Image (cartoon, rainbow, N blue to C red):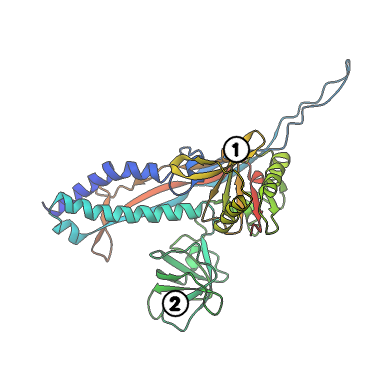
């Protein structure tokens, strides 16, 4: 079997066997939140949503013979965002296309590459759902005396294998990148200076500045994650200023280092009474989830679980006339819980598909490398019609 025929076989397998599964699973597996919310088809670069503000004004009491209340419809604000570009690569070496002579060997080589690409896309989509859109993974303190090792303030959003960019403090655009490298290892225990260490593969003569780290070419290009709504340092969301429009600022609730049912009930009640939000999912950072689970255990509380789309497990929490799903979400800050009304969230997207190359196929020889690349693309963004109805419970531990 020749090289050209092998490429055709790889392409057919990707399109017919892998892509349908990829499309389905990547809409579910990154997060229980993504699995539950609606995912409308993105048909234009501009994505809009109408956000109701408060109640209708057209109500009043009166008496016979007197004027009835003035007409007053519900006030609305128009939210807009633009579709973000999402990419993932599947690479096959030129050597594999020439020397892979059996269907079994071809399937094995392709499966390894697809699984790696899928795992990377799943991790980054799941992370970005809770990010603030800037793409900042962690602050970089300094390059240590050790070769190719940097100190960072957080290791929650970084992982071995990622290709990352480094920016100096004050960088404004993606073009301000100072260094690009690949993460080889992450020390998840703080060193004597109180920071985490990251080992990198970069050019040996390139200094890494004090500043911050992002996924390659992603600075200020990521989807509008929930963090953009909760982060007070970001004033505008969906084109609207939080300062000038307090109704879009979410509910915040201090647990005072003691998360329990009373705290959760108080936060959900405030969201419902003030922001007309029917929170139905509570996303817990790792330590906050463990703290709440321990509270239930110590107090011998009866616990009921619910199986969500994608097989995710939740703790059922009864509030009013509905159940709220409490789930563990590793990308939420460790000591926080984020409450969402999933009906107010939509992830608009075109859907994952392969980019067609000029030849009409999906594989293209990468410049300067002996590999063929098939590029998976998706375009879209997350939008919330009631950001003020989100809930942030902090100091849970």
Q: Secondary structure at mark 2?
A: strand
The image shows residue 200 at horizontal and vertical percentages of 40, 73
* Farthest top residue in view: 65
* Farthest left residue in view: 1
Q: Few, some or many C-alpha atoms within 10 Å of disc 2 (few <14, some 14-19, many ≥20)?
A: many
Q: Nearer the viewer, residue 329 or 81?
A: 329
Q: Which residue is mark 2?
A: 149
Residue under the point 51% across and 56% down = 330
Compared to 175, does 117 lie above or below? above
Left or right of 105, for residue 385: right
Q: Nearer the viewer, mark 2 or mark 1?
A: 1
* Farthest front residue in view: 300
The image shows residue 171 at horizontal and vertical percentages of 55, 68
Q: Which mark is residue 323?
A: 1
Residue under the point 41% across and 42% down = 351
Q: Few, some or many C-alpha atoms within 10 Å of disc 1 (few <14, some 14-19, many ≥20)?
A: some
Marks 2 and 1, the one that precedes in the sequence: 2
């Amino acid at each position: 079997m020749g090289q050209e025929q092998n490429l055709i076989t790889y392409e057919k397998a990707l399109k017919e066997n892998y892509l349908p599964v990829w499309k389905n699973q990547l809409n579910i597996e990154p997060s229980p939140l993504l699995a539950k919310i609606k995912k409308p088809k993105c048909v234009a670069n501009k994505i809009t949503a109408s956000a109701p503000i408060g109640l209708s004004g057209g109500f009043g009491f009166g008496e016979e013979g007197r004027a009835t209340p003035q007409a007053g419809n519900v006030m609305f604000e128009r939210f807009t965002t633009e579709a973000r570009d999402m990419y993932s690569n599947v690479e096959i070496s030129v050597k594999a296309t020439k020397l892979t002579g059996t269907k079994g060997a071809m399937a094995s080589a392709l499966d390894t590459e697809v699984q790696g690409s899928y795992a990377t896309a799943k991790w980054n989509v799941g992370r970005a759902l809770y990010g603030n859109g800037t793409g900042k993974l962690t602050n970089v303190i300094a390059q240590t005396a050790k070769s190719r090792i940097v100190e960072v303030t957080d290791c929650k959003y970084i992982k071995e294998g990622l290709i990352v960019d480094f920016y100096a403090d004050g960088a404004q655009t993606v073009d301000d990148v100072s260094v690009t490298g690949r993460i080889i290892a992450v020390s998840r225990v703080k060193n004597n200076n109180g920071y985490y260490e990251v080992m990198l593969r970069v050019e040996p003569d390139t200094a890494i500045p004090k500043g911050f780290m992002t996924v390659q070419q992603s600075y200020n290009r990521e989807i509008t994650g929930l963090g953009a709504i909760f982060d007070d340092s970001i004033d505008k969301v969906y084109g609207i200023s939080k300062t000038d429009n307090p109704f879009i600022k979410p509910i915040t609730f201090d647990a005072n280092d003691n998360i329990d049912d009373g705290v959760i009930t108080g936060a959900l009640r405030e969201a419902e009474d003030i922001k007309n939000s029917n929170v139905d999912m509570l996303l817990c950072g790792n330590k906050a989830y463990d703290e709440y689970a321990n509270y239930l255990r110590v107090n011998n509380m009866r616990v009921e679980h619910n199986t969500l789309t994608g097989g995710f497990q939740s703790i059922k929490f009864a509030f009013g006339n509905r159940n709220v799903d409490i789930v563990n979400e590793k990308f939420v800050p460790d000591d926080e819980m984020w409450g969402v009304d999933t009906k107010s969230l939509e992830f608009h997207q075109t859907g994952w598909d392969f980019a067609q190359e000029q030849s009409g196929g999906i594989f293209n020889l990468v410049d300067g490398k002996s590999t063929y690349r098939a590029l998976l693309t998706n375009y879209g963004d997350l939008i919330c019609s009631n950001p003020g109805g989100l809930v942030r419970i902090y100091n849970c531990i």
